[in-house]
Each structure stands twice: as structure tokens, then as C-alpha cells.
Image: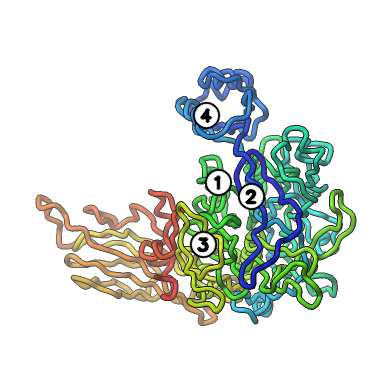
């Protein structure tokens, strides 16, 4: 998986022989990162520039860069896509961006690159859906979650599949699809005879030798159509319990198809517009989305750092309450964009026994892992007697180029692997969580999915290698996962759904207080899963070093806390719902000694403050001792200064290393 001028779909090539314990990683085309497009956002205060015509704004960029820059289209009221006079990459491209970013009217200027879908070059196959069951160590126990909910009644989730589009004629998807949109802005890439429109149907994304004779496909790999979006969508929400085809994770989950990838991939600007539209945000030139997504699945990406354009979109989307799930990629290197953006849930790939699949990316940015498909027997050729046993079953079309007929993958001829198919298992699990608790925020989905994850096995019969974070090397083989390299653990859908049914305790207070100053503490924003309600609150103090704090009313939803001297301690809130389910939330607190010249009063009335304060001078939704847990997870995605996003509840002990 490489980030370059376009997302290249994998060539469908003959598979090499499998070693007994290794995963097929296949040939990966390293498409160039050259691009002749950029994305520019203008600062809100640049009123003169924003009032100027598109041609005038392009002229301003031309003057700043020394290039001939032309306006291509507007993405939003303050964001434009521009064409450079030629494709460039590396230091040359960065020098141009540096010049543009130096303009005080520019909020950011970033390269508009293409992204690659995250699948290993291979053809799909039919496999037993072992990954939804509970027999194998890495299985997700989704079948057990169906005893609690199938997302078929009540508030069913909407999951956006931002991908190659979808085959609406597939019988396992026809009844599940909501009106989507095609955001591909280049007719050659779109391959459907036009550009952006309300038809998210996948016409096929093949690239043949004739395509490679002209731009923009010169450096693209030849290959048959992938039907990638249809594959991904079927894992999330294929029609189930109907006696036909395969089962999806959410039986009633609705699929919102958003087409951003076509022949040889898609540009960042189209992907970002598709993400924003999926969440219900306004995108210039596109109609309002009448069915905003609760969850967005991104089985695509690149291998560079998250840039300002992606992070800005992610912040807008998660701020609206939409969870973003992304595959980490398939190159045995650290996760790239968009999985490594802050507040995106990055998903790695594991084998059926819980070890990392050789191809999966790993390290900071990987938040959880799920099955990605693997084989244990030598081959190919695979046979009915020796099939690729642990590949993932998906819906597909039989057409090599244009669509031909709906079908399913098989065991023998076209094995289906990749972290592209790990991510939708997590997105589907989140949809089931939404069914039992639609009030969850993106941060809370992440917390519960990580807390409920099954621990990675600490040994393996097939490898002794411990996964390491790749720095200047590729970790391209099977290895034993750690929480630093593969995230919090292995997806356990049943445990995640159970966790979502419990009440969710939230502590509001200041983390640093002054001695002898009463501070407000509140759990009033805690909530229970519908239709339950929180019926009791219980405050306590644990892990005290120094003076012991006192709580005015330990059974009140909101009360005050005071400590007479220097102290470091944990404030614990237990909430109980009307079904008797409980949840403990820990909040770390410490006293701050005032300067010697300042003599604090023995006590302060509520509402006044000598630096520690009765009123909430800043709000922390502290859902655990995350600052202690973060190094163990290897997370690097919480930006400095965003305290409200960084807090998680206390992790189970096995998650810490």
C-alpha cells in the first residue's frame, strides 16, 4: 500500500507457493507519489481572498509559487482544488507547498495524492465465516453478539463504505443500500462516463495495457476489476438470516455507498469530500446527505503522516459524533494516512491464531486488530482437498472488467486477504454497539472496543518472532503481537456489545486542585444504554499518597471534594443502572502547592477559586488512566493540547506491558 498520485488496485496475478506458516504478500506496485494537484484551504479571516474569483485566487498562488497554477474546483466555501502545471514529487513538491503555506491567507496547502485500497493482490474466494464464530483464537465471537442484537430493530446504524462504490444488484446488498454519491471528479478514473453524480454504482476499476499508454494510468498496475467496495460492504452488512448467501456482521445495518476510488485509485480531495459528505457535512456541488453515517469505514490509505487536510476533515466528522474506522495497510510498515490521523480507529490484521499477518502494517496508529485472512497450507494451486482454509468470505461480481453477475468468493481459485477486510469487521461491531447504545461518541466506541478486546496470545506454535515497531526495516512476516505493535487486543464483538450495554461513567472536574479549596466533582453526564437509566452514584478515593481527601456527599451525582495538604490520589465514580449493571471510572487528581507568597484560606466557598477552583474552569471527560496506558498501546494519535480527546477509562491489566 503506497500513497502516490492515485490509488492503484492490485493486479490479479498468479499466486506464488505458500510456505507452511507464511502469508502471501504478493507483488505490490510502488506507484509514484507524483501529483499535479493540490488542496488549499483559505483562512476565515482572509476576506479579500475569499471574496476574489477562483481565477484570482489561482493567480495569487501562481505568484507565491512561481508555477502556473489553475483552479480546478471548489470543495467547500473556503477550500479549493488546484492543478499545477506539471506533476512533481519529493523535495520539489514540498518546496512548492512550503511557499504556499507561507502565505498568511493560507490555512494549509497539501498535495492531492492518490490512495491505494488496502488489500493484498489476490482474487476473492469463498471461505467458511470462521471469523464471525468463536472456534479459532482470533475469531470475533460475532455469532454470540447476535444473541444480544442483530441491529435489525430500533435504531439501526448507518455505515458509510467510502470505497470503489457498490454493486446494487447483489442479492446480499440490494435491500441494505441507502442513496449514496459518486465523488470521483476525473471522468477517466470514474470509468462510468461522467464525473460526480448521485450514482455510487461500481462500474469496474480494471486497468489494462491500453489504459497504460496514456495518462493518468501510465504508472498503474494492470488488473481486473476488484469490486472492492462490494466486498467490504458485505462484511459489514450483508443481508442475513434469509437463507441466501453469506451473513454480514449487522443483519439490519444500512450501507451508505460513497464512491471515491476508480481506475487506479482516487485523489485525496475526492476521498476527503466523500468522508465529509458521508458524515452529513456540506460539500460544494453535492446534495445534502439525508442519511448521515454513524460510522465510516475507510479500507484505503497511504504510508505517510496524516496531513492537515485529512486531520481537519477527521476533526469535523468526529466532532459531529461519527466514528471513523480505517485499515492500517499491508506493507509491514507503520500505518499511514488516514489510519494514523488523530481520532481515527486504526485496524490491523491478524491470522486465525492471533499472530500478526505477515503483510499487516503495525505500530503506533494501530488501535485494535481483527482477522485479515490467511492460509496455512502450501499452495497454490489450492484444491478442494487442500483449500485456503482461513481466507475471508465476501460478496463479489464475476466480471473481470465490466460487471457480469453477483457471486461469492470461493476457497480455491481466488483467496481474499488484507487489512481492507479487517476494518469492516470492526465497523460492523461498532454498528452492533450502536444498536444497543446509540448515545456513544467516537471516543467511547474506541474505549469500549479496546477495553473489551481479547488479549493477544503470548506464544505461537508457528513463530517465535515478537512483533517490533518497524523503523528502518519492514516487519513483513508473521509475529507475536504486543499492545505496542497491534493495538489493544483482538476484536471481540460480543464483549464490545456487552460493554456498550453497561452504563458509562463520566467524571467532570479539574485534575489539579489547591489544598483546602473545595472543588466541584460531578458524574451527572454519565448515561445508561437505552432504555435503562442511571439510578445511583458512588464516589470513593483510592491510591492515596499524602493527605486523604474528603467528599461532601459520596452518594450524590454532583458534590464537592477537599484535601487539607499535598496529595496524589484517584477519584473513583461507580454508576449503577436500573438493571443493576455498574461501571467504574477513575480520575487522577493531584494537589498544587500555592507559591510561598500566597496564603490560601482554610476553605473556600463553592464558586470561588484560588487556582484550584469551585467552578469547572476546564472540563475533562476522564474515562480511565489513559496517560499511563498510552505508552503501552503505542498510540501517537492524540494531538498535544487536546486533553478532552485523550482521556480513556481504566484499561484491563492485560493490556499494559
Apparent side of residue 401 relative to residue 254 in the rendered image (left or right): right
Which of 48/31 is in front?
Answer: 31
Q: Which mark is residue 316?
A: 1
Q: CA distance from mark 3 to mark 4?
A: 34 Å
Residues under numbered marks 2 and 3 in contact, where contact means CB atoms less than 8 Å apart: no
Sequence-first disc among 2 and 1: 2
Residues under numbered marks 2 and 1 in contact, where contact means CB atoms less than 8 Å apart: yes
Sequence-first disc among 3 and 1: 1
Q: Residue at x 63, y 63 (%)?
A: 422
Q: CA distance from mark 1 to mark 4?
A: 31 Å
* Quarter where residue 139 is shown: bottom right
Query: Which residue is label 2 attached to?
Result: 279
Q: Nearer the viewer, mark 3 or mark 1?
A: 3
Q: CA distance from mark 4 to mark 2?
A: 35 Å
Residues under numbered marks 3 and 1 in contact, where contact means CB atoms less than 8 Å apart: no
Residues under numbered marks 1 and 4 in contact, where contact means CB atoms less than 8 Å apart: no
In the image, residue 214 above or below residue 436 = above
Q: Which mark is residue 536?
A: none
Q: Which mark is residue 367?
A: 3
Query: Which residue is label 4 attached to?
Result: 92
Q: Nearer the viewer, mark 3 or mark 4?
A: 4
Label 2 Cα crowd, 10 Å radius (few <14 / some 14-19 / many 20+): many
Sequence-first disc among 2 and 3: 2
Sequence-first disc among 1 and 4: 4
Image x and y of residue 473, in percent: 48, 54
Q: Furthest-left residue in view?
A: 597
In the image, residue 242 above or below residue 359 = below
Amino acid at each position: 500500500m503506497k500513497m502516490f498520485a492515485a490509488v492503484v488496485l492490485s493486479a490479479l496475478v498468479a499466486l506464488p507457493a505458500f510456505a507452511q506458516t507464511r502469508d502471501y504478500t504478493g507483488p505490490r506496485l510502488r506507484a509514484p507519489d507524483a501529483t499535479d494537484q493540490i488542496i488549499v484551504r483559505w483562512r476565515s479571516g482572509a476576506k479579500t481572498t475569499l471574496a476574489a474569483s477562483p481565477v484570482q485566487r489561482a493567480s495569487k498562488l501562481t505568484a507565491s509559487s512561481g508555477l502556473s497554477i489553475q483552479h480546478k474546483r471548489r470543495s467547500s466555501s473556503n477550500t479549493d482544488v488546484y492543478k499545477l502545471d506539471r506533476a512533481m514529487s519529493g523535495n520539489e513538491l514540498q518546496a512548492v507547498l512550503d511557499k504556499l503555506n507561507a502565505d498568511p491567507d493560507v490555512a494549509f496547502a497539501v498535495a492531492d495524492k492518490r490512495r491505494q485500497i488496502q488489500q493484498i493482490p489476490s482474487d476473492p474466494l469463498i471461505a467458511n465465516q470462521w471469523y464471525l464464530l468463536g472456534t479459532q483464537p482470533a475469531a470475533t465471537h460475532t455469532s454470540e453478539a447476535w444473541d444480544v442484537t442483530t441491529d435489525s430493530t430500533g435504531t439501526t446504524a448507518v455505515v458509510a463504505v467510502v470505497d470503489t462504490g457498490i454493486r446494487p444488484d447483489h442479492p446480499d446488498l440490494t435491500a441494505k443500500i441507502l442513496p449514496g454519491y459518486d465523488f470521483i471528479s476525473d471522468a477517466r478514473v470514474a470509468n462510468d462516463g461522467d464525473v460526480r453524480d448521485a450514482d455510487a454504482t461500481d462500474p469496474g476499476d480494471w486497468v489494462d495495457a491500453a489504459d497504460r499508454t496514456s495518462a493518468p494510468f501510465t504508472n498503474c498496475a494492470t488488473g481486473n476489476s476488484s469490486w472492492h467496495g462490494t466486498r467490504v460492504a458485505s462484511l459489514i452488512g450483508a443481508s442475513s438470516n434469509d437463507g441466501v448467501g453469506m451473513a454480514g456482521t449487522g443483519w439490519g445495518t444500512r450501507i451508505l455507498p460513497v464512491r471515491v476510488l476508480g481506475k487506479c485509485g482516487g485523489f485525496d480531495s475526492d476521498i476527503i469530500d466523500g468522508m465529509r459528505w458521508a458524515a452529513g457535512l456540506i460539500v460544494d456541488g453535492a446534495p445534502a446527505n439525508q442519511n448521515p453515517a454513524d460510522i465510516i469505514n475507510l479500507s484505503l490509505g497511504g504510508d505517510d503522516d496524516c496531513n492537515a487536510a485529512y486531520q481537519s476533515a477527521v476533526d469535523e466528522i468526529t466532532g459531529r459524533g461519527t466514528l471513523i474506522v480505517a485499515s492500517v495497510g499491508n506493507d509491514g510498515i507503520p500505518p499511514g494516512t488516514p489510519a494514523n490521523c488523530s481520532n481515527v480507529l486504526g485496524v490491523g490484521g491478524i491470522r486465525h491464531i492471533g499472530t500478526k499477518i505477515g503483510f499487516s502494517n503495525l505500530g503506533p496508529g494501530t488501535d485494535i486488530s481483527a482477522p485479515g485472512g490467511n492460509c496455512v497450507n502450501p499452495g497454490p494451486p489450492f484444491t478442494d482437498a487442500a483449500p485456503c482454509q482461513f481466507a475471508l468470505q465476501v460478496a463479489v461480481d464475476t466480471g473481470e472488467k465490466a460487471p457480469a453477475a453477483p457471486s461469492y468468493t470461493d476457497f480455491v481459485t481466488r483467496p481474499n486477504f488484507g487489512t481492507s477486510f479487517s476494518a469492516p469487521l470492526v465497523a460492523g461491531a461498532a454498528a452492533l454497539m450502536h444498536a444497543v447504545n446509540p448515545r456513544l461518541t467516537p471516543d467511547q466506541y474506541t474505549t469500549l472496543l479496546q477495553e473489551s478486546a481479547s488479549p493477544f496470545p503470548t506464544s505461537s506454535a508457528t513463530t517465535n518472532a515478537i512483533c517490533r515497531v518497524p523503523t528502518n526495516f519492514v516487519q513483513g512476516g508473521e509475529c507475536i503481537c504486543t499492545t505496542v505493535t497491534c493495538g489493544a487486543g483482538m476484536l471481540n464483538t460480543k464483549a464490545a456489545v456487552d460493554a456498550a450495554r453497561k452504563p458509562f461513567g463520566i467524571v467532570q472536574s479539574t485534575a489539579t486542585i489547591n489544598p483546602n479549596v473545595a472543588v466541584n466533582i460531578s458524574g451527572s453526564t454519565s448515561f445508561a444504554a437505552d432504555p435503562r437509566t442511571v439510578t445511583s452514584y458512588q464516589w470513593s478515593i483510592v491510591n492515596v499518597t499524602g493527605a486523604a481527601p474528603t467528599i461532601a456527599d459520596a452518594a450524590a451525582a454532583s458534590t464537592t471534594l477537599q484535601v487539607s495538604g499535598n496529595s496524589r490520589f484517584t477519584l473513583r465514580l461507580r454508576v449503577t443502572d436500573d438493571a443493576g449493571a455498574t461501571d467504574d471510572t477513575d480520575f487522577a487528581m493531584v494537589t498544587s502547592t500555592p507559591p510561598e507568597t500566597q496564603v490560601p484560606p482554610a476553605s473556600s466557598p463553592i464558586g470561588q477559586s484560588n487556582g484550584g477552583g469551585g467552578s469547572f474552569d476546564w472540563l475533562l471527560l476522564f474515562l480511565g488512566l489513559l496517560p499511563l496506558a498510552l505508552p503501552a498501546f503505542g498510540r501517537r494519535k492524540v494531538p498535544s493540547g487536546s486533553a478532552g480527546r485523550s482521556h480513556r477509562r481504566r484499561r484491563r491489566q492485560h493490556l499494559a506491558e
